[in-house]
Amino acid sequence: MPQSDILLKLIELLIQKAFPFAVYQYPDSDVICVVAQREKIHLVHDIKEICSSNGFLISPFESARTGEGYFINADLFACDKAGFEVMYKKIKDAGSDSKLLLGSLPKEMTREEYLEMTGNVIQKLRSKQFDKVVVSRVKSIEREEDFFVADFFLKLTEKYPGAFVYLFFIPHSGMWVGATPETLISQKKNGDAVIMSLAGTLPVEEGKEIKWEEKEIVEQQYVSDFIRLRLTELGIRDYIEEPTKTIFAGKMAHLQTIFKVPANQVERQLGDLVKGLHPTPAVCGLPKADAFQLIEHAELHDRRFYTGYLGPWRLDGKSDLFVNLRCAEITEGKINLYVGGGLTADSNPEKEWEETELKAGTLLSVLEEREI
């Protein structure tokens, strides 16, 4: 049996048995890993609780206020066909949880509601109440009867090899899938920590040069300034900041700056660094606390895991956390796409709507099997 077939069977069984699990593939890798927990999901109240644990960490956007997240312990962990087969046999004989409903019913904004919301926020930006605010919306589509989330995950790994592609299921909380281009923080075993500043979005058009305007440049600079400040607050000064460059994620271009922090500088304070970075201005805004509060009042939906962070934690000797972008919540009858964009005083509501449509196309192009 091909590896993809046993993987599909394994994911189907994990869902059927209601095991907390995550499936993921690193950027520029063809290795898919599965991590699953035998018991009920563990709620983390502070990232420091899991400093020596191995598993998969999932923190929602509101963890910036509550500190709470979910941790899937690596009771079962495999990254190849043989491992998948062993895992399948172990799970097959296990008991299952009761029937669980998937997901939520978030409020979907109309175009007019979105334009009104962004217009109001831009006015606050122009009156200097904020430097930057990131707002989002939900785009819901009907879930077809023949839709299988594991197939969708595999298609995303094929179409977006440069992204962190994942699928996770938390009983009583939901199932999410995504292909995110943004790293929050990454640290190899006893190695340097890498932090990414990613912001600014432009569509990629064949034969047309990418030209960044002041709005996108300033938007990305806010994120880099924020990271420098967080590092300084923790007494970290001997870091390397690479030159800002343009990167591509599907049909979109972004501005990226990489920060590298020596292992001896981040030792014993990786958890504090993660807490200080989330949420970055790339997904929230500045001033952070005020922008967070505005988002909760302005948006019609609960972001839940969108713009939170997730990833393998101390698995195979490394920790890699990614910002949860280009993602969808899978419910019983709907697929809810979460998309957003950063607003500054120079933003235009119509262009912001177009940007969210472009970002929704990352997953829609695979769901509808069309090019964007």
Image: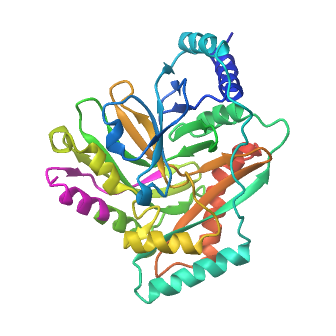
Q: Residue 16 in the image: x percent, y percent?
A: 71, 27
Residue 106 location (% of width, % of height): 69, 59
Q: As rendered, which of 202 and 300 lies closer to the eye?
A: 300
- Specify how the rendered protein is coloured: rainbow
Residue 151, image x, y percentages: 71, 31
The answer to whether residue 307 shows anywhere in this view is: yes
Q: Residue at x 44, y 90 (%)?
A: 127
Q: Nearer the viewer, residue 225 or 38?
A: 38
| Quarter occupied by residue 148 | top right
Q: Quadrant of the N terminus?
A: top right
Which residue lies at the image location 27% right of the left edge and 29% below the top edge? Answer: 189
Q: Which residues are magenta?
A: 226-247
The residue sitting at the right extreme is 145
Q: Is residue 245 magenta?
A: yes
- Identify the residue at horizontal 28%, vertical 55% (top origin): 243
Left-right relation of 280 to 358: left
Give yes or no for residue 198 being in the magenta stretch: no
